[in-house]
Image (cartoon, rainbow, N blue to C red):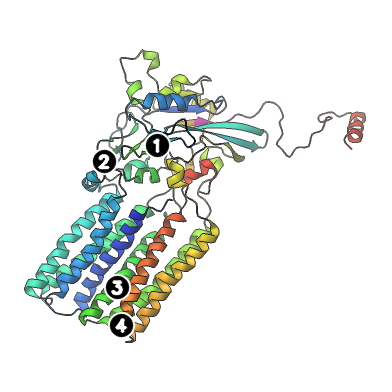
Amino acid sequence: MTSLPYATTPTKKLGLVIDLDTCVGCHACAVNCKEWNASGFHAPLPDHDPYGGNPDGVWFNRVHSYELESEGHGCRTVNFPRSCLHCDNPACVTVCPTGASYKRADDGIVLINTDICIGCKLCSWACPYGAREFDEDAGVMKKCTLCIDRIYNTSLPEEDRVPACVSTCPSHARHFGDFNDPESHVSILVSARGSMDLMEELGYRPVNKYLPPQRAKIETHGYEATESSAEGSSSPLLKLLDRILSR
Amino acid sequence: MRPASSVLLLTTLTGFGYGLLAWMGVFEIFGGLPDTRSFGPAATLTALGFASAGLVASTMHLGRPERAWRAFSQWRSSWLAREGLAAAATNLPALGFAISWWISGPDVPLTVALGLCTGVMAMLTIGCTAMIYASLKPIRQWYNAHTLPDYLIYGAFSGILLLTLILGFSHGAVRLAAGIGTVLGVTGLIAKRAYWTYIDSQTPMVTLASALGFSSGLVRPLDLPHFTENFILREMGFRIARRHRTKLRRLVILVAFAIPIACAGLAALGVMPEALSVFAAMSAGMGLFIERWLFFAEATHVAAIYYGRAA
């Protein structure tokens, strides 16, 4: 059913918190995601020409790097892993004509039933985050499952029952939990650090949250700031020397 | 957005087919169709042929065409499902209209009622197609108040040109139909120019900063996640050069509208209506295909902004 499960209030709202301050952009989450999912719920995942000149394939996680320049931050690198946000208002679900795309009522995870997907790609057009990737080999759409086959997998040790991207992150930038529980690790992180929804203006109400880069504790400058060795010094003699030496 | 020829064929051909059914309904009520026994069934089957060709073409765009029947189920939420249902449902009154015409003749109330019903269903189907695009929030060139009326206008325009062509060969009110075609051509041209003016003045719905959840600051892409095109970039990051866009827009004005308007206008005045109506319909068919190509090629998707492309 591609109508959203409004009737029931989900007991759980599972998702990720990604700390943009601590993400080092190592792509381990993307690689481990690919490794797990190539043999998991959505297996196999296309991987064409992986070691050649024009590799192409389906990945559920893509790590971008940006340069952020703002007042007080100076200029800094922000690494940004992008994956499905398991939105509360997922248009990717409601546009699906077959019922293949759905949002689970009990934990809010957005999934695809690839057994009935017709591969019309409309869900990928409806997603503003570019989270869904088409499997050309199987002719169906694929996406992040929040590692549904790990988080409920009782054959795994309890500490491993988290998404593959979370378990592998070497800098602990990724956190998994229940946003409906105000005492959960992820809820506390979000309330402590604050976060904005991605593309808030579109109203998809993403569940996954990103913790924004914090203000630098030291004074930093952007590209435009001129180098001045006497910066911060109030001594007129040093300023004069600086002006002479700067000629 | 990448223009997939199967989807371009779908919307162009169904525009002709359902537009023709809509105008058959109107002409059936107000008169102007020839009352020969074969006209109603032949014209209806022609219209359904165009529509079915479009629908069959659209299944080529599916990854799993053999599962296409599943697309009828989610009509409560999905405009694509509604389009499929409306298209299938239109066949019923359309075939009823053809049969009733054949058996009882064009003037009995049942035939008139079925003709009207077919016309309404046909326009509803075009409306559902338009809403598939008009409801996609991430694509600002589609998610606006132009998309729905534009599709209905182009459907009505192509339908009346096809009816003019058919009436030219069957001694119906060809000059009346050509006159309506001229008016709709001018309407379509005005609508298309208004649409272009609108999308050229639009600003993107999101900024790279808001896409990353930052309330302020200047953001520049530094490193891409991958160095070859992926599905997202192929499908959503399609780019068209500005100079090509300008040329194609001129081509649309000429082939989709100016030539059909001139031909239909002359036909309405009684100048070679048979030959000119063929020319008008063929030119409009090619022109509207290019128009539909541009409708996709000029559309940008907000997801492209993560890669630093236009959104």
Label 4 sits on residue:
B273
The residue pinned by badge 2 equals: A99
Would you say B50 lies left or right of A51 here? Answer: left
Q: Amino acid at mark 3?
A: Ile
State the CA–CA distance, disc 3 to disc 2.
Answer: 37 Å
Q: Are marks 3 and 1 on the same chain?
A: no
What residue did someone put label 3 on?
B160
Point out which mark residue B182 bears.
none
Q: Closest to the observer: B206 or B289?
A: B289
Structural crowding at the residue carrying mark 3, measured as other residues with C-alpha within 10 Å and reported as few (<14), some (14–19) or many (≥20):
many
Secondary structure found at label 2: loop
- Mark 2 and mark 1 lie on one chain; the one further toward the N terminus is 1
- Give the CA distance from mark 2 to mark 1: 17 Å
Position of residue B221 measured from the top left corner of the image (x, y, whole percent) = 58, 39
Can you tell which of label 4 and label 1 is closer to the viewer? Answer: 4
User: Residue B47: percent from the left, percent from the top?
Assistant: 23, 66
The residues tagged by marks 2 and 4 sit, at their Cα atoms, a distance apart of: 49 Å
